[in-house]
């Protein structure tokens, strides 16, 4: 099934890389006027060049509330807003410095919260958040699990709060996705992680940003979808 977003305004915060970039490309290919936002103008320019379709860019740091408010006051309203922006450092609760733990929550949870609070979304439009399957399968990533669970709960609550404005809110929860998120890892260790996932996950594959983008576009395009958390995790939650 193909979706049409002709002439609709779509904002993807975190659209300069990975899942956000793939979502931006899907919306642009479906006819939307796409604006991608993140902290780095050079990353945005490179991604906009890859996406094409007249994709526009805006520098925005989701941890800076004054900047978030000023951006939305200036940018006008959108039909669909996607938040895939995040930078979180992992580690055991007992050893990860508290400042890093707070920074992770500030980036991913409070970033989504700030955007949800300030964004102007048109009637019949949508907000889509990105969490992660660690919300229900934390493994050793306790903090990431807690952040993702908070994001999913935020999405469900907002779906009720924004219902009177006829704005739908959903969350997509990815499993392991081969994206630039993992660029900081040693290349051999990263490949071993991907190989292990492809050998053991029920889907027998590593996720691609496009897999998650499919779910984001489906949720934005589907008038009956709200309050949902859609897993795109290769079956990682049930494995
Ligand atoms: N990849 C995975 O395996 C995986 C699994 C589960 C969940 N997820 C979640 O999926 C989401 C997207 O991940 P990804 O794989 O696409 O990561 P990615 O490739 O690292 O992309 C992250 C994006 O967020 C932007 N960003 C980071 N901090 C920001 C901030 N404070 N304000 C605005 N933009 C910011 C980055 O651009 P700038 O650097 O230019 O700011 C970049 O565009 C994240 O929430 C991640 O936790 C990913």
Image (spheres, rainbow, N blue to C red):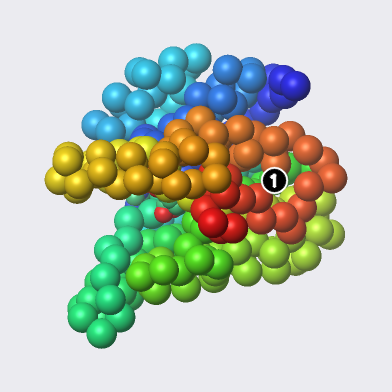
Q: Is residue 18 left or right of residue 203?
A: left
| Nearer the observer, 40 or 143 | 143
| Nearer the observer, 73 or 7 | 7
Q: Position of residue 209 (x, y in %)?
A: 46, 35
Q: Position of residue 88 (x, y in %)?
A: 32, 61
Q: Is residue 74 left or right of residue 184?
A: right
| Nearer the observer, 73 or 237 | 237
Q: Is residue 55 above or below residue 137?
A: above
Say which quadrant the C terminus sits in: bottom right
Q: Is residue 89 above or below residue 40?
A: below
Q: Position of residue 62 (x, y in %)?
A: 40, 55
Say which quadrant the N terminus sits in: top right
Query: How many C-alpha atoms fall within 10 Å of the one at disc 1: few (<14), some, or many (≥20)?
Result: many
Q: Is residue 146 above or below residue 43?
A: below
Task: Look at 48% across and 63% down and name the residue there.
Answer: 134
Task: Look at 75% across and 66% down and name the residue there.
Answer: 161
Q: Is residue 115 visible?
A: no
Residue furthest to the front in view is: 199
Task: Look at 34% across and 41% down and name the residue there.
Answer: 194
The picture quadrant where one finds residue 164 is: bottom right
Q: Determine whether the residue tagged by mark 1 lies in a helix, strand or loop.
A: strand
Circle 1 residue: 126
Determine whether the beta carbon of the residue marked 1 sits less than 8 angstroms from the nearest atom of ligand 1: no
Q: Is residue 2 visible?
A: yes
């Amino acid at each position: 099934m193909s979706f049409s977003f002709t002439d609709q305004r779509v904002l993807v915060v975190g659209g300069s890389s990975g899942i956000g970039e793939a979502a931006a490309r899907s919306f642009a290919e479906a006819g939307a006027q796409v604006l991608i936002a993140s902290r780095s103008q050079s990353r945005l320019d490179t991604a906009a060049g890859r996406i094409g379709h007249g994709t526009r860019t805006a520098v925005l740091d989701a941890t800076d509330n004054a900047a978030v408010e000023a951006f939305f006051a200036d940018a006008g309203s959108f039909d669909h807003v996607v938040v895939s922006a995040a930078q979180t450092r992992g580690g055991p609760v007992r050893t990860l410095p508290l400042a890093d733990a707070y920074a992770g929550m500030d980036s991913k949870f409070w970033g989504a919260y700030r955007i949800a609070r300030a964004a102007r979304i048109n009637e019949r439009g949508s907000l889509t958040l990105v969490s992660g399957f660690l919300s229900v399968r934390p493994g050793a990533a306790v903090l990431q699990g807690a952040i993702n669970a908070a994001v999913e709960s935020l999405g469900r609550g907002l779906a009720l709060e924004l219902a009177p404005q006829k704005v739908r809110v959903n969350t997509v929860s990815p499993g392991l996705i081969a994206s630039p998120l993992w660029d900081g890892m040693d290349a051999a260790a990263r490949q071993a992680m991907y190989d292990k996932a492809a050998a053991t996950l029920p889907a027998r594959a590593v996720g691609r940003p496009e897999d998650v983008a499919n779910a984001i576009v489906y949720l934005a395009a589907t008038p009956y979808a709200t309050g949902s958390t859609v897993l795109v995790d290769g079956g990682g939650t049930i494995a």
